[in-house]
Amino acid sequence: MKIIGEKKPIIGVTEMYSVIDSSGALFTSNMNKVTYAWYIFKKYKNGDFVNVTKNNIPKTGQSVPYSFGYNVEYRLDVYKLEKELLTQKDKASFVASYFVNPTKKASKADIKKAVLYNKGAKNVDLAGIGNSLTVRVECINMVGKSVKVHIWNAENKGEPNFMNSKLIDINDKGIGLTQFNVMQLLSPTESMNLMIGNIKAIGFFVTATYEQQSVTNKAPVVVVSQFQSIADIFENARSMSSYKDNDAPESTESCGGKYCIKKGDKNELIREVNIRLAGFGGNVPTDEFTDRTEKMIKQFQRDYMKVSETGKICGNVLKAIDEFSNKFDISETLWKQLKCSCGTKGKQAKSVLRGYKEINNCDGFGDGTGTSTSPEKSNKYEYPGIHRSLLFGFKALQFYFTKQNIYKIDHFTSGYRCRFKNYKTTNHQGKAIDLQFSKGNWEIRNEVKKNLTELRQIRDSIIIPNLGAQKEWPNSNLFSIEPIDLLYDSKGNVRFDHTFSWIHIDVREFNSQYLKDIYFCKSKSKLNGKSIIELAIESGYTSTCNCNVSLNTQNNDNDKKATDRVDPKTLKTSQKGKDFIKSWEKFRNEVYDDSEGYATIGYGYLIAYKSYKSVTKSDIEKLEITWDEFKNGITEKKALELFNKKIDLYEKAVQRDIKVNLYQYEFDALVSLIFNTGQNFLNIGGKNKKETKIKININNHLYSEGADEFSDVTNGGTRGLVERRKDEIDIFNNNNYINHK
């Protein structure tokens, strides 16, 4: 079998791709209940193909449509899904790969379709007064351009205004999305008449315009009165053709538990779930769905997904696991810190643990020397990497630290220590990590008593309750934390069997079957492996993946109702917010002076409050870049790493200074503002270096008044800042993200 389809499709144009047999025939019979799952991969500059399948849910069928957004190489991987005779589960087998090279040679910028629908409703063409309507615009050759959309109703067309019109950006798929609140689209008279039943229904249309083009949806979304039956409305109010958007999101459906994975089940997919969610209450890498598994999933659903706790694995739990793993992944910087720092690699040196000289073959994670022995605390075997459950536990810690703004994880003090680096303990030969923290601007370091209170607070309020960890090592199969204290031996030397400026977490007490080599890894790719969705499909759980009980995570960037403003401490900058900031800061691989004359690099990363020409090597030593990177430039990957760290800093500043609930887009606008002005701006940027009116107004629930004050932060009317403030106000007030060109 092979794949056919357009090898060089035009960007933004949808093409069909099909699986055919050796004779060139498209299969039409499905007597054996065979289907095909399609994954799409995008090639990056380093030559790697990265899975960009939306939500890791493949398209299925013998023929599927694709539209490409960039002129880079893509790869389509197809798996055959065939029902097993006895179990009736899907068995996946690889079919073929197909390489596609989209071209920019499109005819012209063109709006293909404008669609209006009530997202998530059973009937997407009907809505109530309290609903929001989604606009979807599909375009050709318009990536990065903006389209104006205007919603109007059949009774009163109305002129465009800020309530019924927006500019929306077209993404790399050729699609633009936005939402409008129905109540805002209705006049006071229309709202009242619908509420009391004088008007049974009002039909709404959307018109999308770009330059001289204009496209309107073919049939309305009908907003109905609560006094009119759905049947009547659908029959009477829709006098025009019954057009439906075939590409509109399907309404999510629950399997009612039929396909959910639950307590008592046993398979390799469960083992991966037990590993990847180990930080949500603690677990071991077993293939059994135990009581601990159920408790762990409930904690994940409650804390991360923000949904009701079923304790079962459905499609949205699997999707959320992938989302969590990607969002709180371990950075390359942290991976470097995990590697063994022994200084004699490749040389003959004295082994600390063995006491004699030998060649040091450590590859950053030992060389596998030794034979596994008991007890584990003195096992001299050098495991091949760091235990995956421990590292996924660290991912969970990164998540839980975002739920507060007192403490911050700084770095790994120690990860792997081979026998040439090791001290008396062998924990660090793959079973342990040491973490360093800070409190505000105070780095918790050195041999001082005041550290102990803070470390114990972190241990007792964050690590133990969330990871299900234990103090020291009394019980098996739990994360363990080394005792915290500052003690001295009889000679007055500090003891290192207690931690006094760091926290040590290990899996030393895991049973031997959970400490096999297969549970250890040396790289990000080996830690993460395939997406959990992909593993589920390969394991025959396609029906489970398609069970989509409503998912509402704290990372959802969708529009929210007024009652859905949330505590800013629960928010992170959305991808739209990050893209907006990056569009203004622009990537510069070489150092330059910004508009204020300050040395800058990457995405607005400040090097020093002086010209780059005056920067010295001592200035650089305080930063997260090297002298060579300063002189010769940095990669975009490094720039993104610095950017995300800076974003994290400013998120915490917003969370510190804003005491009222915010929408996601209000939070994004504030992060963008202080990214540009500094983390303390809201506190000292006002008259006489006091609190700004922005902060005062918002904290008094005067949201729009606070946003209006953005316009005064322009350094005396600097043109670029004037435009940026306008765009930030638009985000804050209207959820309208317009990236800077």
Image: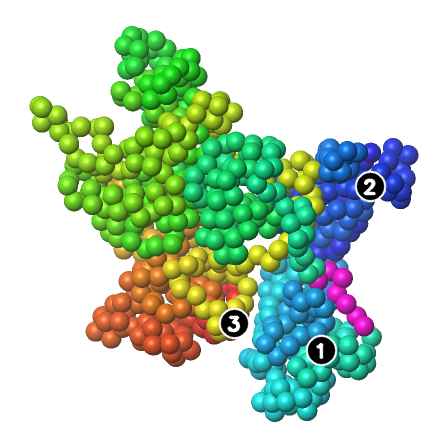
Query: Disc 3 or disc 2, which is closer to the eye?
Result: 2
Query: Measured along the vertical axis of the image, is residue 554 above or below residue 537?
Result: below
**514 vs 97, nearest the viewer:** 514
Q: Amino acid at mark 3?
A: Lys
Mark 2 = which residue? Answer: 33
Q: Which of the marked residues, 3 or 1, is nearer the chain's N terminus?
A: 1
Residue at 67% of width from left, 75% of height from top?
A: 127
Mark 3 = which residue? Answer: 561
How far from the left and from the top, in percent, is residue 702? 38, 78
Mark 1 = which residue? Answer: 222
Q: Are marks 3 and 1 in contact (CB under 8 Å)?
A: no
Query: Measured along the vertical axis of the image, is residue 492 above or below residue 235?
Result: above
Q: Secondary structure at mark 2?
A: loop
For mark 3, does the 10 Å Cα neighbourhood hold few (<14), some (14 to 19), or many (20 or more) residues? few
Q: Amino acid at mark 1?
A: Val
Q: Secondary structure at mark 1?
A: strand
For mark 1, does the 10 Å Cα neighbourhood hold few (<14), some (14 to 19), or many (20 or more) residues? many
